[in-house]
Image (tube, rainbow, N blue to C red):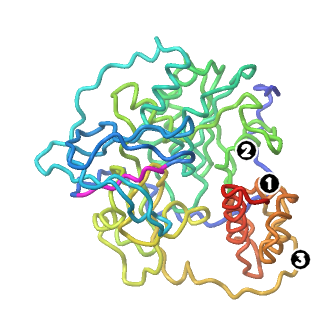
Amino acid sequence: MHSLNPMNLLRGSFRHGVHPAAHKEQTVDLPIQRVPFGDRYLMPLGQHIGAPSKPVVGVGQRLYRGQIIAEPGAFVSTFLHSPVTGRVIDIGPHRHTDGTFKPAIEIEADPYATQQLPPAQTRDWKKLDITAFIGEVQRAGIVGMGGAAFPAHVKYSIPEGQQITELLVNGAECEPYLTNDHRLMVERPEALLRGIEILLEKLGAARATIGVEANKPDAIEILRDHLSPDLPVEVVSLPVKYPQGAEKMLIKAVYGQEVPAGQLPRDLGVTVNNVGTVVAIADWFDTGMPLIERVVTVSGPGAAYPSNLIVPLGTSVRDVLSFCGGLRSETREVVMGGPMMGSPIASLDVPVMKGTSGILAFTNTETLRPPEYPCIRCGRCLEACPYFLNPSRLARLAKARLFSEMKDYRVQDCVECGSCTFTCPSGIPIVQLIRTAKDNLAHASRKGEPT
C-alpha cells in the first residue's frame, strides 16, 4: 500500500479539467427549508449502485416513518426505509428516472400522522467493532450522497492488509447550479464534524481533511471556526475547477498523488466521503434517523423559485417543483443531478432518490444542441480529460460500434464527467457516445456475450 505524506499536502489542483460557469448565485445564500409531506411516495428498489433491495413488506401493510421496507439484495446493496408513516398500496413496476419501469414500493401517507420518527434505541458507536459498525451503516441505508449512490458500508469494508490513514471529506461541489453541500456545511457544521469524529474512530484513520472549493469562503470560515483542537481535522481551500469533486481528482488536489488506473483510493490509504454522507452518519448514530430524506437544490432558469430543500425520499419531482412555484413556461428540460453529469428525466412523476442532489429546469438556451461537425482533431478534449484518455478516439469507435476495441483504450476508466463534450468545438456529443458504448458492453457482459 502506498502512503501519503501529510506534511506535503499540495492543496493545489489536478491536471486538465474545465471551468464551466458556476451559476450558483440563485441558491447559494438560500437557507435549507423543508418540503411539506405529500400524499404518495414511491421508493424504487434500485436506488444505489449494486443489487436492488428486496421488499420485506406487503401491500396493505401499515408502516411507521423510518421502518425498514426492503433489505439488501447482496453485500453491495442496502436497506430501504419508509419516508413516512402510512401504508403500502403497491409493489411493482413504476416509471424510473430513465423512463423505464422498475420495481418500486408505493406508499400512501397517513394524513393524520405527525410524521415524527418513533423513539430510537440509542446506538453507542464507541462500543461497536468495525464489523458491527459496517452493519449499522448498511442498516441505515446510507449511500454516497454526491450522486453516485455507492453503498457507504462497502467503502468501509477494508480488505485485510490495508489500512485507512486519511479520511477525505468532499465539499468541492464542483457541479454548476448545485449548492446543497454548501448549505449543509454552512448550516450543519456540528453534524459534519460529528460524523467525521465517528468515522475517524471506527476506521482508525489518523486525520481528516475537508476539501472545499474557494468559491465557498463562508463554508470554509464556518467549518474552521467549529474545529476542535482535539479533533485532527483540517479544512483546505481548493482552486475552482471541474471535476474537482471526482474522488481521484480530489485526492490529487489535496495530497498531490494520483490513484493509479485500476486501483481505488483505499490503495493509497484514503477513503473519500461526500459531505452529505458524513452528516447522514451522524444523524443515524445520534438520532436514529436512517436515510429517508436529503437536501436537494432546485435551480435553473426554468425554476420559478429556486431553493435548497429537505425532501423526503420518494417525493415526486412534480411535487417538489410545485412547492417551488412550478416551472416557467419556457422550460424545455428537467435534469436530475448537475448539468454536467446529471440526466434529463422522462417524467415529472418520478421520485427523488438517495442520489438526487439537484432538480434543474432548463430552457431552450441551455438545452439547444449545437450543430455537429466532423472532428477537427484539435485535441481540446484530450486537454480537458482529467483521466488522460483520448475521448475523440473513443467517440469514433463508439460511432462505428466497435465497442470491444474501446476497452483497449480504457473506456471503463471514463467517469462520464462530460468535460470532453463541454469543450468540443465541433459539437460532438462525446460523453453521450461513450456512455452508450459502456451500456452496450455491460449489456453484453450480463448476457454472457463476448465483448
Question: Where 297 sits versus 401, above or below?
Answer: above
- Image coords of residue 32 (percent x, y): 36, 50
Query: Which residue position holds label 3?
Result: 377
Give the SS element for disc 1: loop
Query: Which residue position holds label 1?
Result: 387
Q: Earlier in the sequence, mark 3 or mark 1?
A: 3
Where's the C terminus, which quadrant? Answer: bottom right
Q: Is residue 165 visible?
A: no
Query: Pointer 1: residues within 10 angstroms few (<14), some, or many (20+)?
Result: some
Disc 3, disc 2: CB below 8 Å? no
Direction from residue 172 to residue 257 in the image, left or right = right
Query: Which residue position holds label 2?
Result: 248
Residue at 36% across / 75% down in the picture?
A: 327
Q: Is residue 305 visible?
A: yes
Q: Where on the picture, by quarter, is residue 184?
A: top left
Of residues 214 and 295, the one nearer the viewer is 295
Residue that lies at the very extreme toward the top in this rendered image: 127
Direction from residue 50 to residue 412 in the image, left or right = right
Question: Where 68 sits versus 242, above or below?
Answer: above
Q: Earlier in the sequence, mark 3 or mark 2?
A: 2
Give the SS element for disc 3: loop
Q: Earlier in the sequence, mark 2 or mark 1?
A: 2
**Prevailing secondary structure class for the magenta stretch in the rendered image:** strand
Kind of residue at disc 3? Arg
- Image coords of residue 248 (percent x, y): 73, 44
